Amino acid sequence: MRVLGLETSCDDTGVAIYDSGRGLLAHRLFSQELIHADYGGVVPELASRDHVRKVLPLVRAVMVEASTPSSAIDGVAYTAGPGLVGALLVGAAIGRALAFAWQVPALGVHHMEGHLLSPMLEPDPPTFPFLALLVSGGHTLLADVRAVGDYTILGESLDDAVGEAFDKTAKLLGLGYPGGPAIAKTAEAGVAGRFRFPRPMTEKPGLSFSFSGLKTAVVNAARGHALDEQTVADIAHGFQEAAVDTLVIKCKRALKQTGHQRLVVAGGVSANRLLRERMASMAAARGSKVHYPRPEFSTDNAAMIAYTGCLRLAAGQHDDLAFGAYPRWEIDQLPKVI
Ligand code: KG4
Ligand code: ZN
């Protein structure tokens, strides 16, 4: 089965073609980074308008690259949520219309399930069951994953997502948008130990996260010091250490609690090098294995949407002619794939 996938949930326009027999055939991404940079964050209306401009040219490019005429496409998958409603509607409307014209089934895919399954596109994919840590701009969650669509949420953030904490810290320190890569780069020049921030919710039992206290600690540190280049690097370093440590402590606890030996870490923040290193040593010390998407597929992309859509369409799941966009959509509400 060959599936066209569209991703337009936030500020990246992604298009990909995945074939169940041959794997990923082509994928393209247009990042709107420059459009939103001046505003220090994503402007939803500008995001929607640019998706309108980019989706179809990218569809054409990907079809050419994959030597795939429309007659060879067996289904269309688009991100239906969670995300920005206007941005989601662009991919949903175009995806649904293409499937109608080509007389193939269409399916709205859950963006976070796409992230969760993204390591399946790598050479050494995890086998079920496993523990998953999903860390993006909008979500921080730990899930017990038994099969496709069979998920139990073990813990979520009670306030800010960890990616959001990276973005807000970067903004505060004048490092621009998007914040994650900027913090990671700046932290390289930071002095270890000058700023030590709290590891929120790690003292108490449980698997919930909270990043607003860490954010407040960073705000207080920034207010109390002249923000010269070295101090900015030192704060970025202290923040990154605290955020990464918190995620690693919670994963270690969840592995112990569930007895899982495999851990998937995915979503934009999983591109972070320090997180990958620390998670790998924690896992190695207890004989567990961590699976990541390649860094390019840590952040938003359509390869994960085409792949997830292909699994579900191949199992006979599809939408009717109406299409939807769901800004809020819980991952544990998805149907199972049997
Ligand atoms: O998954 P994603 O691309 O979009 C959402 O679904 O939200 O995640 C974006 C988030 C942003 O908050 C961004 O700052 C963060 O991932 N991010 C990183 C890194 N690269 C992206 N955070 C830390 N280190 C990175 N290298
Ligand atoms: Zn994402």
Image (spheres, rainbow, N blue to C red):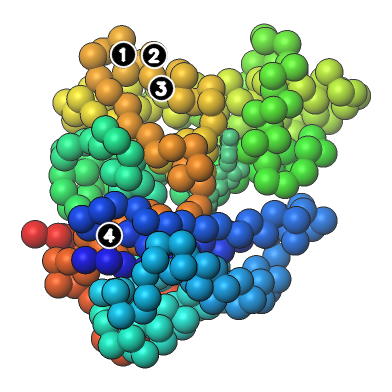
Q: Which marked residue is nearer to the observer: mark 3 or mark 4? A: 4
Kind of residue at badge 3: Met
Using the image as rendered, state which of residue 303 and residue 66 is in the foreground: 66
The tag on residue 19 is 4
Residue labelled with disc 1:
284
For residue 280, say whether it is visible: yes
Crowd tier of the residue under label 3, counting other residues whose Cα lies within 10 Å: few below 14, some 14–19, many 20 or above: many
Q: Which quadrant of the view contains residue 334?
A: bottom left
Of the pair 176 and 4, the residue shown nearer to us: 4
Tell me if label 2 and label 1 are in contact, CB under 8 Å: yes
Q: Which residue in the structure is indicated by mark 2?
A: 281
- In the picture, the disc for residue 279 is 3
- In space, the residues marked 2 and 1 are separated at their CA atoms by 5 Å
The answer, for residue 333, to whether it is visible in the render is no
Q: Is residue 83 above or below residue 249?
A: below
Residues at discs 2 and 3 in contact (Cβ within 8 Å) = yes
Is 165 placed above or below 183 here? Answer: below
Tag 1 secondary structure: helix
User: Circle 2 — which element?
Assistant: helix
Q: Height in image: 166 above or below 58? A: above
